[in-house]
Image (cartoon, rainbow, N blue to C red):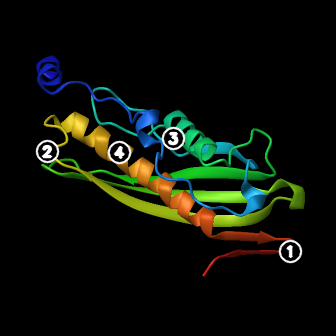
Amino acid sequence: MLAALLYLTGCASGAKMGNMVYEGPLKAYDTALEDNVDVTNVSGGEETNPAWTSEIDNDAFAGALKQTLQKQGLLSGTGRYQLEALLLEVDQPMFGLDFEVTTHVRYILTDRENNGAVVLNETVVTPYTATIGDAFAAIKRLRLANEGSGKANIQGLLDKLSELRIQPGNISLAQ
């Protein structure tokens, strides 16, 4: 019975790293961040069980985050600023024609040259909806919604980073 169900619906696959990379225009960042951000830890993601539902795993999200930061001119393997991403929650529907997935990711950016001082500590919450027009099969539609929400979340981080103003002894978000 399970084999027949899997045959008819397909197997779930995890969110693909390449589909979560932000490909939009370059943003303006404080010069202190340029080529100076090191992704040190990504956690909280879940592995996909092919017999169940698509998920966002740590490796895929970390890869998308690193590629995005590289494209934005921020990534450095030994940067002064260390970025940690914690996938707090990925809200997924169980049924429906349109699948809205909302990711909740806490980003913590610290300054390794300033005793690990916290530069940014923000939770970014982003929804994304994949419709039946995007994919007929529910399993693929859920994967697309996961990927879209992950990409939107990374874009939300970029928005936060572009608002940062870093000056010696004074770090703030632009108002």
Is residue 68 positioned above or below 50 on the image? below
**For this view, does 98 lie left or right of residue 174?**
left
Q: Quadrant of residue 157?
A: bottom right
Q: Could you classify mark 2 by the number of other residues whose Cα lies within 10 Å: few (under 14), some (14-19), or many (20 or more)?
A: some
The one nearer the camera, 133 or 72, is 72
Q: Amino acid at mark 4?
A: Asn
Q: Residue 143's quadrant in the figure? A: top left
State the CA–CA distance, disc 1 to disc 2: 51 Å
Q: Mark 4 falls on what kind of element?
A: helix
The type of residue carrying mark 2 is Ile
Tell me the crowding category of disc 1: few under 14, some 14 to 19, or many 20 or more residues within 10 angstroms, Cα based: few
Label 2 residue SS: loop
* Marked residue nearer the N-terminal end (1 or 3): 3
User: What's the mark number on residue 119?
Assistant: none
Q: Residue at x 43, y 48 (%)?
A: 150
Could you give the CA–CA distance between mark 3 and mark 2, rounded to whole angstroms?
25 Å
For discs 4 and 2, the disc positioned in front in the rendered view:
2
Q: Which residue corresponds to the image point at 40% horizontal and 38% vertical from the top-left?
A: 19
Mark 4 and mark 3 in contact? Answer it, CB < 8 Å: no
Amino acid type of the residue that numbered disc 1 sits on in the rendered structure: Gly
How far apart are the alpha carbons under marks 4 and 3? 11 Å
Return the residue at label 4: 146
Please say if the residues under marks 4 and 2 sit with CB atoms less than 8 Å apart. no
Task: Say the numbered circle drawn on residue 132.
Answer: 2
Q: Indicate which disc residue 169 carries.
A: 1
Determine which residue is flagged by label 3. 61
Give the percent coordinates (x, y) of residue 104.
46, 58
Disc 3 or 2, which lies upstream in sequence? Answer: 3
Q: CA distance from mark 1 to mark 3?
A: 32 Å
Label 3: which secondary element: helix
Q: Quadrant of the N terminus?
A: top left
The C terminus: image quadrant: bottom right
